[in-house]
Image: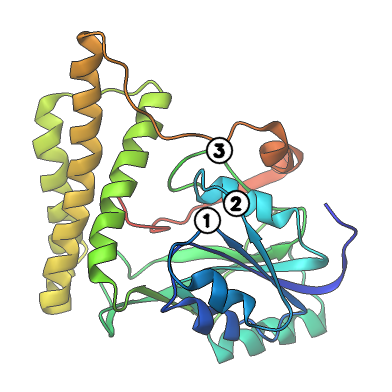
Amino acid sequence: MEETQHGVTGLVTCFNEEHNIGACIESLEWCDEIIVVDSFSTDRTAEIAQSYDGVRFFQREYFGAGAQKNWAMEKVRFDWIFLLDSDERCTPKLRDEVRALLKSGPNHLAYMMNRTVYLLGKRIRYSGWQRDRVSRFFRTGTAYYENRRVHSRLHTTGEVPILKNTIEHHMVDRTFTEYAFRLGKYGYWGAGQMWRDGKRTRVSEVITRPLWRFIKVYVVQLGVLDGSRGLVFCLLQAYGTYMKFAILWGWQVNHARGIEPDLPEFDDAEDTWEGLERVSDADNESAEPNGGPAC
Protein backbone atom coordinates (compact mmCIF):
# COMPACT_ATOMS: atom_id res chain seq x y z
CA MET A 1 0.00 0.00 0.00
CA GLU A 2 1.20 3.52 -0.79
CA GLU A 3 2.10 5.88 2.06
CA THR A 4 -1.16 7.51 3.13
CA GLN A 5 -1.97 11.17 3.72
CA HIS A 6 -4.68 12.85 5.76
CA GLY A 7 -7.93 12.91 3.79
CA VAL A 8 -10.47 10.63 2.13
CA THR A 9 -10.29 8.37 -0.91
CA GLY A 10 -13.59 7.72 -2.67
CA LEU A 11 -13.44 4.20 -4.09
CA VAL A 12 -15.79 2.77 -6.73
CA THR A 13 -15.87 -0.64 -8.41
CA CYS A 14 -17.91 -1.06 -11.58
CA PHE A 15 -18.87 -3.07 -14.64
CA ASN A 16 -21.17 -1.88 -17.45
CA GLU A 17 -22.72 0.98 -15.47
CA GLU A 18 -22.72 3.79 -18.03
CA HIS A 19 -26.07 5.07 -16.73
CA ASN A 20 -24.88 5.20 -13.11
CA ILE A 21 -21.14 5.80 -12.99
CA GLY A 22 -21.29 9.56 -13.59
CA ALA A 23 -23.74 10.26 -10.76
CA CYS A 24 -21.78 7.96 -8.46
CA ILE A 25 -18.50 9.78 -9.13
CA GLU A 26 -20.14 13.20 -8.76
CA SER A 27 -21.48 12.21 -5.34
CA LEU A 28 -17.86 11.60 -4.25
CA GLU A 29 -16.31 14.80 -5.61
CA TRP A 30 -15.89 16.06 -2.03
CA CYS A 31 -13.22 13.38 -1.50
CA ASP A 32 -9.51 14.14 -1.86
CA GLU A 33 -9.19 11.56 -4.62
CA ILE A 34 -11.47 9.10 -6.42
CA ILE A 35 -10.35 5.65 -7.53
CA VAL A 36 -12.45 3.73 -10.05
CA VAL A 37 -11.71 0.05 -10.68
CA ASP A 38 -13.51 -1.25 -13.75
CA SER A 39 -13.92 -4.92 -14.70
CA PHE A 40 -13.34 -4.29 -18.45
CA SER A 41 -16.77 -2.85 -19.20
CA THR A 42 -18.06 -3.25 -22.74
CA ASP A 43 -20.23 -0.11 -22.66
CA ARG A 44 -19.16 3.54 -22.07
CA THR A 45 -18.44 3.13 -18.36
CA ALA A 46 -14.67 3.42 -18.71
CA GLU A 47 -14.92 6.41 -21.06
CA ILE A 48 -17.27 8.28 -18.72
CA ALA A 49 -15.23 7.52 -15.60
CA GLN A 50 -12.01 8.75 -17.18
CA SER A 51 -13.66 11.98 -18.29
CA TYR A 52 -13.74 13.25 -14.69
CA ASP A 53 -10.74 15.24 -13.50
CA GLY A 54 -8.99 13.69 -10.54
CA VAL A 55 -10.23 10.15 -11.10
CA ARG A 56 -7.53 7.50 -10.90
CA PHE A 57 -8.77 4.78 -13.24
CA PHE A 58 -7.77 1.09 -13.16
CA GLN A 59 -9.03 -2.06 -14.84
CA ARG A 60 -8.84 -5.54 -13.37
CA GLU A 61 -10.40 -8.93 -14.06
CA TYR A 62 -13.33 -9.59 -11.72
CA PHE A 63 -13.07 -12.45 -9.22
CA GLY A 64 -15.81 -11.23 -6.90
CA ALA A 65 -16.58 -8.05 -4.99
CA GLY A 66 -14.32 -8.92 -2.06
CA ALA A 67 -11.25 -9.52 -4.20
CA GLN A 68 -11.90 -6.44 -6.32
CA LYS A 69 -12.32 -4.11 -3.34
CA ASN A 70 -9.35 -5.49 -1.42
CA TRP A 71 -7.17 -4.98 -4.49
CA ALA A 72 -8.48 -1.45 -4.93
CA MET A 73 -7.87 -0.55 -1.29
CA GLU A 74 -4.17 -1.17 -1.76
CA LYS A 75 -4.13 1.72 -4.26
CA VAL A 76 -5.44 4.48 -1.97
CA ARG A 77 -3.33 7.49 -1.01
CA PHE A 78 -5.37 8.82 1.91
CA ASP A 79 -6.04 7.57 5.40
CA TRP A 80 -9.84 7.16 5.15
CA ILE A 81 -11.85 5.27 2.52
CA PHE A 82 -15.43 5.96 1.45
CA LEU A 83 -16.49 3.02 -0.70
CA LEU A 84 -19.42 2.80 -3.12
CA ASP A 85 -20.68 0.42 -5.76
CA SER A 86 -21.34 2.16 -9.05
CA ASP A 87 -25.13 2.09 -8.62
CA GLU A 88 -24.89 3.90 -5.28
CA ARG A 89 -24.71 7.58 -4.31
CA CYS A 90 -23.39 9.40 -1.28
CA THR A 91 -26.20 11.80 -0.37
CA PRO A 92 -25.36 15.45 0.46
CA LYS A 93 -26.50 14.94 4.06
CA LEU A 94 -24.24 11.91 4.45
CA ARG A 95 -21.35 13.85 2.88
CA ASP A 96 -21.82 16.67 5.41
CA GLU A 97 -22.08 14.19 8.29
CA VAL A 98 -18.80 12.50 7.28
CA ARG A 99 -17.08 15.86 6.88
CA ALA A 100 -18.22 16.96 10.34
CA LEU A 101 -17.05 13.64 11.78
CA LEU A 102 -13.60 14.08 10.26
CA LYS A 103 -13.38 17.65 11.49
CA SER A 104 -14.21 16.70 15.07
CA GLY A 105 -11.98 13.63 15.01
CA PRO A 106 -13.44 10.12 14.56
CA ASN A 107 -13.58 7.96 17.69
CA HIS A 108 -13.85 4.71 15.73
CA LEU A 109 -12.05 3.06 12.83
CA ALA A 110 -15.15 2.15 10.79
CA TYR A 111 -18.70 3.39 10.40
CA MET A 112 -21.88 1.79 9.13
CA MET A 113 -24.78 3.44 7.31
CA ASN A 114 -28.24 2.52 6.08
CA ARG A 115 -29.06 2.28 2.37
CA THR A 116 -32.25 3.43 0.71
CA VAL A 117 -33.00 1.16 -2.25
CA TYR A 118 -34.70 2.21 -5.51
CA LEU A 119 -36.29 0.00 -8.15
CA LEU A 120 -37.36 1.58 -11.46
CA GLY A 121 -37.45 5.06 -9.95
CA LYS A 122 -39.34 4.23 -6.76
CA ARG A 123 -38.03 3.41 -3.32
CA ILE A 124 -38.37 -0.16 -2.07
CA ARG A 125 -39.22 0.16 1.62
CA TYR A 126 -39.71 -3.50 2.50
CA SER A 127 -38.94 -6.81 0.71
CA GLY A 128 -35.99 -7.42 3.05
CA TRP A 129 -34.36 -4.02 2.48
CA GLN A 130 -35.83 -2.13 5.44
CA ARG A 131 -32.78 -2.92 7.62
CA ASP A 132 -30.11 -2.80 4.92
CA ARG A 133 -26.87 -1.57 6.53
CA VAL A 134 -23.35 -1.56 5.15
CA SER A 135 -19.92 -0.45 6.38
CA ARG A 136 -18.52 1.87 3.73
CA PHE A 137 -16.45 4.46 5.64
CA PHE A 138 -13.35 3.21 7.41
CA ARG A 139 -9.74 4.00 8.14
CA THR A 140 -7.30 2.70 5.56
CA GLY A 141 -5.70 -0.59 6.57
CA THR A 142 -8.27 -1.50 9.24
CA ALA A 143 -10.97 -3.25 7.16
CA TYR A 144 -10.84 -5.95 4.49
CA TYR A 145 -13.26 -8.27 2.72
CA GLU A 146 -13.21 -12.04 3.17
CA ASN A 147 -12.37 -14.48 0.39
CA ARG A 148 -15.78 -15.30 -1.06
CA ARG A 149 -17.00 -15.05 -4.66
CA VAL A 150 -20.34 -13.48 -3.60
CA HIS A 151 -21.71 -11.68 -0.52
CA SER A 152 -18.27 -11.18 0.97
CA ARG A 153 -18.37 -9.70 4.47
CA LEU A 154 -16.21 -6.77 5.48
CA HIS A 155 -14.06 -7.48 8.53
CA THR A 156 -13.59 -4.29 10.53
CA THR A 157 -11.58 -3.36 13.59
CA GLY A 158 -13.41 -2.41 16.78
CA GLU A 159 -16.93 -1.12 17.32
CA VAL A 160 -18.80 0.08 14.20
CA PRO A 161 -21.39 2.77 14.99
CA ILE A 162 -24.20 3.68 12.59
CA LEU A 163 -24.27 7.11 10.97
CA LYS A 164 -27.56 9.01 10.80
CA ASN A 165 -27.71 9.56 7.04
CA THR A 166 -27.95 7.11 4.15
CA ILE A 167 -26.48 5.89 0.90
CA GLU A 168 -28.85 5.78 -2.08
CA HIS A 169 -28.77 2.43 -3.87
CA HIS A 170 -30.26 2.66 -7.38
CA MET A 171 -30.33 -1.09 -7.73
CA VAL A 172 -32.45 -1.15 -10.88
CA ASP A 173 -32.84 2.12 -12.74
CA ARG A 174 -33.08 1.64 -16.51
CA THR A 175 -31.36 -1.71 -16.95
CA PHE A 176 -33.99 -4.13 -15.68
CA THR A 177 -32.98 -6.71 -18.27
CA GLU A 178 -29.36 -6.51 -17.12
CA TYR A 179 -30.50 -7.02 -13.52
CA ALA A 180 -32.26 -10.25 -14.43
CA PHE A 181 -29.08 -11.53 -16.09
CA ARG A 182 -27.09 -10.37 -13.06
CA LEU A 183 -29.22 -12.56 -10.83
CA GLY A 184 -28.28 -15.53 -12.99
CA LYS A 185 -24.60 -14.67 -12.56
CA TYR A 186 -25.00 -14.38 -8.81
CA GLY A 187 -26.68 -17.77 -8.80
CA TYR A 188 -23.75 -19.28 -10.71
CA TRP A 189 -21.20 -17.61 -8.43
CA GLY A 190 -23.15 -18.65 -5.33
CA ALA A 191 -23.22 -22.25 -6.53
CA GLY A 192 -19.49 -22.06 -7.17
CA GLN A 193 -18.90 -20.82 -3.63
CA MET A 194 -21.00 -23.63 -2.18
CA TRP A 195 -19.14 -26.25 -4.22
CA ARG A 196 -15.80 -24.79 -3.14
CA ASP A 197 -16.96 -24.89 0.50
CA GLY A 198 -17.90 -28.57 0.16
CA LYS A 199 -21.64 -27.95 0.39
CA ARG A 200 -24.10 -30.07 -1.58
CA THR A 201 -27.85 -30.04 -2.06
CA ARG A 202 -30.85 -32.29 -2.61
CA VAL A 203 -33.23 -31.95 -5.52
CA SER A 204 -35.99 -31.09 -3.05
CA GLU A 205 -34.07 -27.94 -2.10
CA VAL A 206 -34.20 -26.78 -5.72
CA ILE A 207 -37.93 -26.39 -5.07
CA THR A 208 -38.16 -25.51 -1.39
CA ARG A 209 -35.33 -22.97 -1.16
CA PRO A 210 -36.76 -20.59 -3.82
CA LEU A 211 -40.26 -21.03 -2.39
CA TRP A 212 -39.09 -20.11 1.09
CA ARG A 213 -37.08 -17.19 -0.30
CA PHE A 214 -40.24 -15.76 -1.87
CA ILE A 215 -42.32 -16.30 1.26
CA LYS A 216 -39.63 -14.71 3.39
CA VAL A 217 -39.19 -11.51 1.37
CA TYR A 218 -42.79 -11.11 0.18
CA VAL A 219 -44.71 -12.14 3.31
CA VAL A 220 -42.41 -12.17 6.35
CA GLN A 221 -40.41 -9.11 5.26
CA LEU A 222 -43.52 -7.37 3.92
CA GLY A 223 -42.64 -7.15 0.22
CA VAL A 224 -46.39 -7.19 -0.42
CA LEU A 225 -46.44 -3.57 0.84
CA ASP A 226 -44.14 -2.51 -2.00
CA GLY A 227 -46.93 -3.12 -4.52
CA SER A 228 -46.20 -4.36 -8.02
CA ARG A 229 -42.49 -3.60 -7.70
CA GLY A 230 -42.38 -5.64 -4.52
CA LEU A 231 -44.03 -8.62 -6.19
CA VAL A 232 -41.69 -8.60 -9.19
CA PHE A 233 -38.65 -7.97 -7.04
CA CYS A 234 -39.45 -10.80 -4.62
CA LEU A 235 -40.07 -13.21 -7.48
CA LEU A 236 -36.67 -12.28 -8.88
CA GLN A 237 -35.03 -13.04 -5.54
CA ALA A 238 -36.66 -16.47 -5.64
CA TYR A 239 -35.34 -16.92 -9.18
CA GLY A 240 -31.79 -16.13 -8.03
CA THR A 241 -32.08 -18.73 -5.28
CA TYR A 242 -33.45 -21.27 -7.76
CA MET A 243 -30.50 -20.70 -10.10
CA LYS A 244 -27.97 -21.25 -7.31
CA PHE A 245 -29.42 -24.53 -6.09
CA ALA A 246 -30.31 -25.82 -9.57
CA ILE A 247 -26.77 -25.21 -10.81
CA LEU A 248 -25.27 -26.84 -7.73
CA TRP A 249 -27.57 -29.87 -8.11
CA GLY A 250 -26.67 -30.16 -11.81
CA TRP A 251 -22.97 -30.17 -10.96
CA GLN A 252 -23.54 -32.98 -8.49
CA VAL A 253 -25.36 -35.05 -11.09
CA ASN A 254 -22.61 -34.53 -13.64
CA HIS A 255 -19.88 -35.15 -11.07
CA ALA A 256 -21.38 -38.60 -10.49
CA ARG A 257 -21.11 -39.13 -14.26
CA GLY A 258 -17.44 -38.17 -14.22
CA ILE A 259 -17.96 -34.62 -15.50
CA GLU A 260 -16.33 -31.91 -13.36
CA PRO A 261 -18.16 -28.61 -12.79
CA ASP A 262 -17.21 -25.48 -14.71
CA LEU A 263 -16.55 -23.35 -11.61
CA PRO A 264 -16.06 -19.57 -11.64
CA GLU A 265 -12.49 -18.42 -11.10
CA PHE A 266 -11.39 -17.38 -7.61
CA ASP A 267 -8.60 -15.00 -6.69
CA ASP A 268 -6.31 -17.00 -4.41
CA ALA A 269 -3.33 -14.67 -4.64
CA GLU A 270 -1.99 -14.17 -1.12
CA ASP A 271 -1.51 -10.43 -1.50
CA THR A 272 -5.24 -9.95 -2.18
CA TRP A 273 -6.07 -11.30 1.28
CA GLU A 274 -3.05 -10.43 3.39
CA GLY A 275 -4.80 -7.33 4.75
CA LEU A 276 -7.58 -9.54 6.09
CA GLU A 277 -5.02 -11.46 8.12
CA ARG A 278 -3.76 -8.20 9.66
CA VAL A 279 -7.15 -7.32 11.11
CA SER A 280 -8.43 -10.82 11.91
CA ASP A 281 -7.30 -10.88 15.55
CA ALA A 282 -9.54 -7.98 16.64
CA ASP A 283 -12.16 -7.68 13.96
CA ASN A 284 -15.91 -7.56 13.59
CA GLU A 285 -17.83 -8.87 10.59
CA SER A 286 -19.85 -5.96 9.27
CA ALA A 287 -22.43 -7.92 7.37
CA GLU A 288 -23.84 -6.54 4.15
CA PRO A 289 -27.07 -8.52 4.24
CA ASN A 290 -28.12 -7.34 0.78
CA GLY A 291 -24.74 -6.58 -0.72
CA GLY A 292 -25.86 -7.62 -4.19
CA PRO A 293 -28.83 -9.71 -5.25
CA ALA A 294 -29.54 -12.13 -2.46
CA CYS A 295 -29.53 -15.77 -3.46
The number of callouts visible is 3
Residue at left offset 11%, top offset 68%? 231
- Cα distance between the residues tagged 1 and 3: 18 Å
Q: Position of residue 103 (x, y in %)?
A: 81, 85
Q: Label 1 near label 2: C-beta < 8 Å?
A: yes
Residue 122 lies in what quarter of the image? bottom left
Residue hosting label 2: 60
Circle 2 or circle 3, nearest the eye: 2
Q: Which mark is residue 173?
A: none
Classify 10 Å Cα crowding around label 2: few (below 14), some (14-19), many (20 and above). few
Q: Which mark is residue 147?
A: 3
Secondary element at tag 2: loop
Residue at left offset 26%, top offset 49%? 184
Image-based side of 147 in relation to 185, left or right: right
* Residue 12 seen by the camera: yes
Classify 10 Å Cα crowding around label 1: few (below 14), some (14-19), many (20 and above). some
Q: Amino acid at mark 1?
A: Ser
Q: Is residue 152 above or below residue 81?
A: above
> Sequence order check: which comes first, mark 2 or mark 1?
1
Residue hosting label 1: 39
Q: Position of residue 283 (x, y in %)?
A: 67, 45
